[in-house]
Image: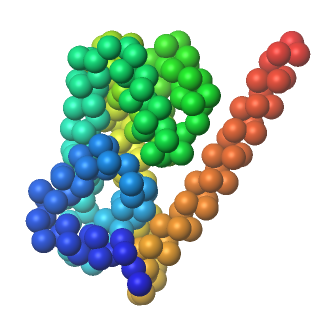
Amino acid sequence: MDPLSSLIEWISLYGLIGLLALGIFERFVPIVPSYGVLVAIGIAADERVWSLYTAVFGSVAGSLFGSLALYWLTLHLSEERVHRMLLWVGRMTGISAPRIDRSIVLFREHQRGLSFGMQLVPSIRLISPIIAGMFRADGRAFAIATLLGILSWNGLFIAVGYIASNVSVETNASTLALQVVVVLLLVELGLALLWRWYHQRSSRH
């Protein structure tokens, strides 16, 4: 049973349009983890379902369009409604309210850097356009930073799937995606501990 491969097989019927739609859908309905889908897209690229260039371009373009649409939508909402939206997305993706509040504070202080960096953090990457809209971040700077972040994120996981499919003849996309999740959690835990240690050390000085 490989549900991700089944999903990719269905998307492949629509070619580039399917990849674009998937990128947009993932931004508005964060049900399936993006890294799992991207790994499966990379495997499909190795199997010549589509070219590697098409896989990266389609997924990045769709995700960027979805991010900018969320940013534009947030610009037209009151701060109270935006905050309710953030909490709703947080419940959908498992982000706690305190973590959302910390992200808001950090974004206020480092808008450009975090527009890029937030695209490299699971779950948080989904709320970054909403936070950017809340603070009326410069649209052009946000778009460029987000594009670079999405390109880095998508390129990484598509490459993982592509390389894994080259190394192993029988690559199960769902199993590989689960392994990637475990690695991501370990990396995120390590970074969180490192940040906590650095913050405590800085406080002492």
Quadrant showing the N terminus: bottom left
Picture residue at 58% right of the left edge, 36% below the top: 96
Between 105 and 89, the residue placed more toward the observer is: 89
Q: Position of residue 78 (x, y in %)?
A: 32, 14
Picture residue at 27% right of the left edge, 70% below the top: 8
Q: Position of residue 21 (x, y in %)?
A: 18, 53
**Image vertical order of residue 98 relative to residue 1, above or below:** above
Picture residue at 53% right of the left edge, 68% below the top: 178
Quadrant showing the C terminus: top right
Instruction: Left or right? Give the position of 175 relative to 139.
Output: right
- Whether residue 25 can be seen here: yes
Between 141 and 19, the residue placed more toward the observer is: 19
**Image vertical order of residue 84 relative to residue 109, above or below:** below
**Image vertical order of residue 143 relative to residue 166, above or below:** above
**Quarter-wise, where is residue 196 in the image?**
top right
Picture residue at 76% right of the left edge, 23% below the top: 199
